[in-house]
Amino acid sequence: MSTLNTLQIAELAEHLENAELQAFEVTKITDDFPDMDYQDAFDIQWAIRRRKEARGTKIVGMKMGLTSWAKMSQMGVAQPCYGFLADYFSVPDGGAIVYDELIHPKIEAELAFVTKADLKGPGCHIGDVLAATDFVVPALEVIDSRYKDFKFDLKSVIADNSSSSRFITGGRARPVHELDLKTLGVVMEINGQVVQTGAGAAVLGHPAASVAMLANMLAERGEYLPAGSFVMVGAITAAVQVNKGDSFSVRYQGLGSISGRVE
Ligand code: 0L1
Ligand code: MG
């Protein structure tokens, strides 16, 4: 079911996409549309995606968000969400995040799965994901909620493409059977100081569970993850605010590291 009409979906997509592209904060959209539901929220996100595709932007991957119990409780939400990754979100390993293009960026240590077979829900599970995975590679997400002070509810955040803004991938790709994804450790440093540590199990108990959940959520809209998909599974660490002039690096057990700076 949905509560918003086609025009309202289109206007909210334009509003939130403008906030992303021009880097300005907005209030959460449920303040003005308290009755909107999850279908409306995803309709807005998919409308933003279609706006970008119509301008020639390529969608290069998907991300899961709010996949740790700690993060869900920190943000006051009860379930994970997903978003899409556009081509211009990608920053090379060792490269710079341009602060002025963003509002209040935070970084998260993540892993990405790259698939070699289609994944379709409903009923997709960890076993399906492991069988369909070509390799796992380190990823770092830059989230940048368009909502003032990162204050939102789940519907507002879904409509805002789950705060997606930039990502870096790098380090060393390895086949999934060589990794113990639950105990895989990460260490995040900012300006040479350790600020976060974590292990893969922070992501829904097992990072592959996140990819399975994405396939199942996409199935609700008749969508699926085609072979060759790049999927970031959600944060292993808490999100950490970064500022102009910061440098950061994340070390991944057995997978090398990713680094970058904010300018
Ligand atoms: O990637 C994430 O886990 C974040 C999803 C959106 C919530 C937020 O902006 O913190
Ligand atoms: Mg994330």
Image (tube, rainbow, N blue to C red):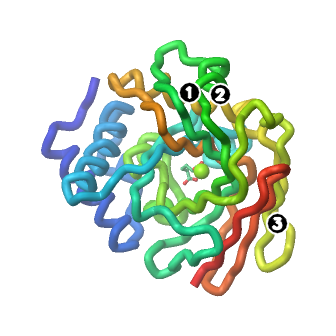
For marks 2 and 3, give the one nearer the viewer.
2
Amino acid identity at mark 2: Ala
User: Is mark 1 in CB contact (under 8 Å) with mark 2?
Assistant: yes
Q: Looking at numbered disc 1 in the image, what kind of residue is underneath it?
A: Met
Q: Residues within 10 Å of mark 3 (few under 14, many from 20)?
A: some
Work out how far the residue at label 2 is from the one at label 3, CA to CA, in angstroms: 26 Å
Q: Which mark is residue 46?
A: none
Identify the residue position indicated by label 2 in the image: 209
Residue at left 30%, top 44%?
A: 44
Q: In this view, which residue lies farthest toward the left?
A: 7
Q: Residue at x 31, y 60 (%)?
A: 17
Left or right: residue 173 compared with residue 223 = right
Q: Which mark is residue 213?
A: 1
Q: Give x and y (percent) for residue 187.
A: 83, 59
Sequence order check, earlier mark of 2 and 3: 3
Q: Secondary structure at mark 3?
A: strand
Are circles 1 and 3 on residues that touch, CB within 8 Å? no
Residue 195 shows which numbered tag?
Answer: 3
